[in-house]
Image (tube, grey):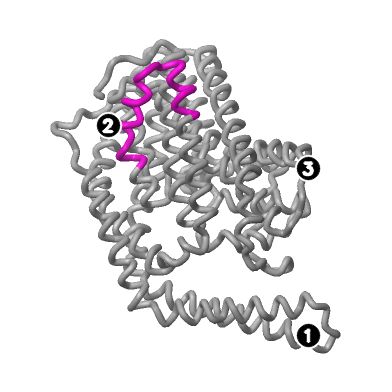
Amino acid sequence: MEAIPSPKKSKLTLYIIIALVIGIALGFVLNKSYVIDENIKIELLEVDLQKVQHQLSQSPDSTQAATLETQKKSIIKERGTIISARDKKVEPFSILADIFLRLIKMIVAPLVFTTLVVGVAKLGDINSVGRIGGKTLLWFLGASLTSLLLGMILVNIFQPGIAMKLPLPDSSTDIGLTNGGLSLKEFLYHVFPASVIDAMAKNEILQIVVFSIFFGVATAAIGEQGKIVVKAMDAIAHVILKVTGYVMNFAPVAVFGAMTAIIAKQGLGILKTYSIFITEFYSGLLILWIVLALVGSLIIGKRVIALLKKMREPILLAFSTSSSEAAFPKTMELLQKFGCKDKIVSFVLPLGYSFNLDGSMMYMTFASLFIAQSYGIDLPLSTQISMLLVLMLTSKGIAGVPRASLVVIAGTLATFNIPEAGLGLLLGIDPLLDMGRSATNVVGNSIATAVVSKWEGELVKGEE
């Protein structure tokens, strides 16, 4: 299934950048005017909450403790009410982004299914699928380990948890996240679908991939009749890519809405408060980009630079919407135009969205150790390596869960007796961090697809 050539160079990237700038500017204005009352009240309540938590930590008598607990619950409830009121005010802007993401989700499942069935059927047999799958998972394993290890090394060098001296949430505070630990049974159930219809309805990419591989191999095995199925799937995939083109026209509007809502709620002041963490984390992401590009260049040569330039549109889209899934259709299209064969792209890229989220991986070790540092918990190197291995296992296949990185981190913190409430330190800036993570996920999966294509001798000269 070949990508549909564009008749002229797309100006979508320019429009997204313009929308990004306008969204930030409008968000700043709204933060200082439209929602300023709510933001001031939230800040005052945060100060009151910290005072109550400090008083509770001083071990008062039982009567006083009960009074303080009641006061604490009252403050938390009032803060939640005000946050809801603020969210309601900026809802018209966030709806723009939500509608776009819903349209993307509408496309992703049928796009993965049709393209992967065509790709696997063209591979011809289960041996070819196993060979390419082995090479793909080998790269994913190395990239994931590198990302986790880099996060661990950088947070030990920078030590933002010690340097920032943030007021700590009470260890008993409920952060509203379920435990992210997956047992082997739960993991396997998450991989293998009980119903492909249910998997598609929930956009469970990994389950769709499993069914598509079976379907594609069976299609190839039945010979002449299978060619009819392949031709039909190929035609459907082209139709879905055409739909993708229509949906992508709304991307600048979605970016504008997303950025306006985020900046209106968070303001630019949070950048100052968390400047150390944000700067160090984004520096880490930049280092990860360089490492991935250098390793990729050993296999595909100087074309890795052309690849990153080619992918600037999906990278920018993932960054501005905080969703690597939003960039999936465009990433698939541009990888084929770059010269990766469709059968490789349709196999590697969907797998990458479950097994190769490099930006999210780095964040997991970075954030987990940051929280430990903030609470003054000294973790020896052996414990940190154990944490890295636990994250390596628990993070796989959980990409479809909302706020997946935070869910996995919450489970890991509980495993190593670090207060889960420490995630409260990051909840406020998580949307800003998620932007960088999502963009990095696109970079990692793009390089992975190009590398596997090269290993298979299926990387040809394309549009650069």
Residue at image position (42%, 33%) is 113
Q: Estimate the x, y position of residue 312 in percent, counting from the top left.
A: 32, 37
Residue 380, numbered circle: 3
Instruction: Identify which residue, 403 or 236, lies in the foreground.
Output: 403
Residue 240, numbered circle: none
Circle 1 sits on which residue? Answer: 66
On screen, residue 70 above or below 8: below
Q: Amino acid at mark 1?
A: Ala
Q: For mark 2, does the 10 Å Cα neighbourhood hold few (<14), some (14 to 19), or many (20 or more) residues?
A: some
**Left or right of residue 112: residue 54:** right
From the image, give the main secondary structure of the stretch colored magenta: helix
Q: Which image quadrant: the C terminus? A: top left
Mark 3 or 2: the one toward you: 3
Circle 2 sits on which residue? Answer: 238
Structural distance between the alpha carbons of marks 3 and 2? 53 Å
Structural distance between the alpha carbons of marks 1 and 2? 64 Å
**Mark 3, secondary structure of its residue:** loop
**Residue 305 covered by magenta stretch:** yes
Stretch in magenta: 291-315
Mark 1 or 2: the one toward you: 1
- Residue lying farthest to the left in this orientation: 7
Instruction: Identify which residue, 16 or 276, lies in the foreground.
Output: 276
The answer to which quarter of the image holds residue 161 is: bottom right
The answer to which quarter of the image holds residue 145 is: top right
